[in-house]
Image (cartoon, rainbow, N blue to C red):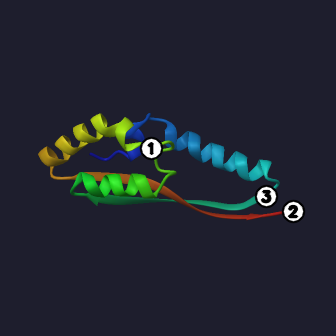
């Protein structure tokens, strides 16, 4: 399974929307973006606790993540992880260089 948590737990277009929103936020703050470099990384999780840990400690991965609210979806993901031997997540990260003109 190669989908980021936002696509598994939320919607298929969240990552692109968040990227555009972040760029707009930089510009609205009066910053000029000099470099916006995207990197893709792959992480493999072998138990649902690791997924939950990341979701709770990296709040921007799924905006508004709440364990109780997502419990049914997490349980389905847990079952898939057991059946498929893990959960592989591809995600984007950015190195951003910006300046105040």
| Residue at (64% x, 43% y) in the render | 21
Q: Secondary structure at mark 1?
A: loop
Q: Are marks 3 and 1 in contact (CB under 8 Å)?
A: no
Q: Check the image and report above or below for 97 versus 56.
A: below
Do tag 2 and tag 3 residues touch (Cβ < 8 Å)? Answer: yes
> Residue 75's x, y, as percent?
23, 40
Disc 2 designates what residue? 101
The residue nearer to you, when weighing 47 against 13, is 47
Q: Nearer the viewer, residue 67 or 75?
A: 67
Using residue 26 as the reference point, say whether residue 4 is left or right of it.
left
Mark toward the start of the polypeptide (2 vs 3): 3
Mark found first going from the N terminus, 1 or 2: 1
Circle 1 sits on which residue? 65
Closest to the camera, between mark 1 and mark 2, is 1
Viewer-nearest residue: 101 or 10: 10
Q: Which mark is residue 32?
A: 3
Q: Residue at x 35, y 59 (%)?
A: 42
Are there few (<14), some (14-19), or many (20+) residues within 10 Å of tag 3? some
Callout 2: 10 Å neighbours few (<14), some, many (20+)?
few
Are the two marked residues, 1 and 2, in contact with CB atoms closer than 8 angstroms?
A: no
Q: CA distance from mark 1 to mark 2?
A: 35 Å
Q: Earlier in the sequence, mark 3 or mark 1?
A: 3
Q: Secondary structure at mark 3?
A: strand
Say which residue appears at 44% left-offset and 43% top-offset: 65
**Image quarter hosting the N terminus:** top left
Q: Quick one: label 1, few (<14), some, or many (20+) residues within 10 Å?
A: some
Q: CA distance from mark 2 to mark 3?
A: 7 Å
């Amino acid at each position: 399974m190669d989908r980021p948590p936002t696509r598994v737990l939320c919607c298929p277009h969240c990552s692109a929307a968040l990227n555009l929103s972040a760029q707009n936020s930089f510009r609205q703050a009066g910053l000029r973006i000099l470099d916006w470099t995207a990197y893709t990384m792959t992480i493999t999780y072998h138990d649902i606790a690791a997924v939950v840990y990341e979701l709770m400690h990296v709040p921007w991965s799924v905006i508004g993540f709440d364990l109780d609210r997502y419990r049914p979806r997490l349980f389905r993901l847990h079952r898939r992880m057991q059946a498929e031997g893990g959960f592989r997540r591809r995600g984007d990260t950015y190195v951003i260089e910006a300046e105040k003109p």
